[in-house]
Amino acid sequence: MKILIFSDTHLGTEFEEKKYDFLSRIISSVDHVIIAGDFYEGFVISFDEFIKSRWQGLFPLLKSKETVYVYGNHDKDKEDERVKLFSDLTTRQYVFHTNGKTFVVEHGDRFKPLLRLLKLFGLEHSSYFTKFYEKTEKLLIRRIGPKIIQAIYKVFNEDIKEKAKEEFQNGEILICGHTHAQEADPSCNFYDTGIIRHGLGQYIIIEDGQVMIKEEWYDSP
């Protein structure tokens, strides 16, 4: 079985046709899909607006792949039955076994709540700050490349690894998103999916128990 894991698409009010096509292509290429959080940008668009937007065109395809939807911190669970429009299972943590290996999929915010500082300034759910951050991240990725994000947020991934090491002591492999810093560290049984945003398409494929990190580009305004 070929499994696709992606996160941090932050789908919002602006419909991007090339991003839509990219997602359609990678979803179509696999047998099963796991969304590891921040599927839509809940600080900018409501869930009701999201499911009525043009992004809903992805829903039948996701359903056909028996998609598991792991909630993030920008798309927190709201106990809305309409998540079944695009997923078969919703959870905060998803554990599965394949080829003798145990995989644990979470968003990652439980280990590293990046919003703690924002809470102090009342910016946790600020759409203005979210849009500012998006523009800054886009500028860095376009001008310098994805390695700048990996360098800036590597410390967050290191924190997650340390906390995960204490919790998972039976060889479990942790896959998460949240930090936007794609990483493969098999020595620590840790993988970060990266992002699908700003023309940068990062994701993970698991096939025959092997984990492969992928990075592509798509046209983005």
Image (tube, rainbow, N blue to C red):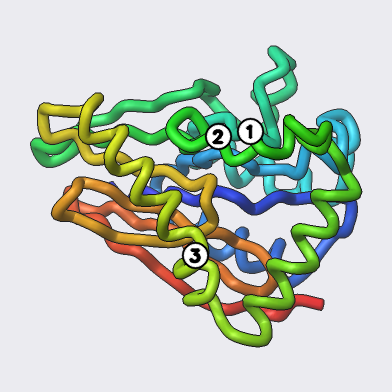
Under mark 2, the amino acid is Pro
Q: Which of labels 3 and 1 is toward the front?
A: 1
Q: 27 above or below 161? A: below
Q: Residues within 10 Å of mark 2 (few under 14, many from 20)?
A: few
Under mark 1, the amino acid is Arg
Identify the secondary structure beneath mark 1: helix
Identify the secondary structure beneath mark 3: strand
Residue 181 percent coordinates (x, y): 48, 60
Q: Residue at x 9, y 36 (%)?
A: 100
Q: Residues within 10 Å of mark 3 (few under 14, many from 20)?
A: many
Residue 193 percent coordinates (x, y): 44, 54
Q: Residue furthest bottom?
A: 143
**CA–CA distance in space, label 2 to label 1:** 6 Å
Identify the secondary structure beneath mark 2: loop
Residue 185 percent coordinates (x, y): 24, 57
**CA–CA distance in space, label 3 to label 1:** 26 Å
- Contact, CB < 8 Å: mark 2 with mark 3? no
Question: Dot 2 corresponds to which residue?
Answer: 113
Q: Which of labels 2 and 3 is toward the front?
A: 2
Question: Dot 3 corresponds to which residue?
Answer: 202
- Contact, CB < 8 Å: mark 2 with mark 1? yes
- Sequence order check, earlier mark of 2 and 3: 2
Tally of marks: 3
**CA–CA distance in space, label 2 to label 3:** 22 Å
Q: Is residue 146 left or right of residue 168?
A: right
Question: Dot 1 corresponds to which residue?
Answer: 116
Q: Is residue 92 left or right of residue 212?
A: right
- Contact, CB < 8 Å: mark 3 with mark 1? no
Q: Which of labels 2 and 1 is toward the front?
A: 1
Q: Residue at x 12, y 35 (%)?
A: 171
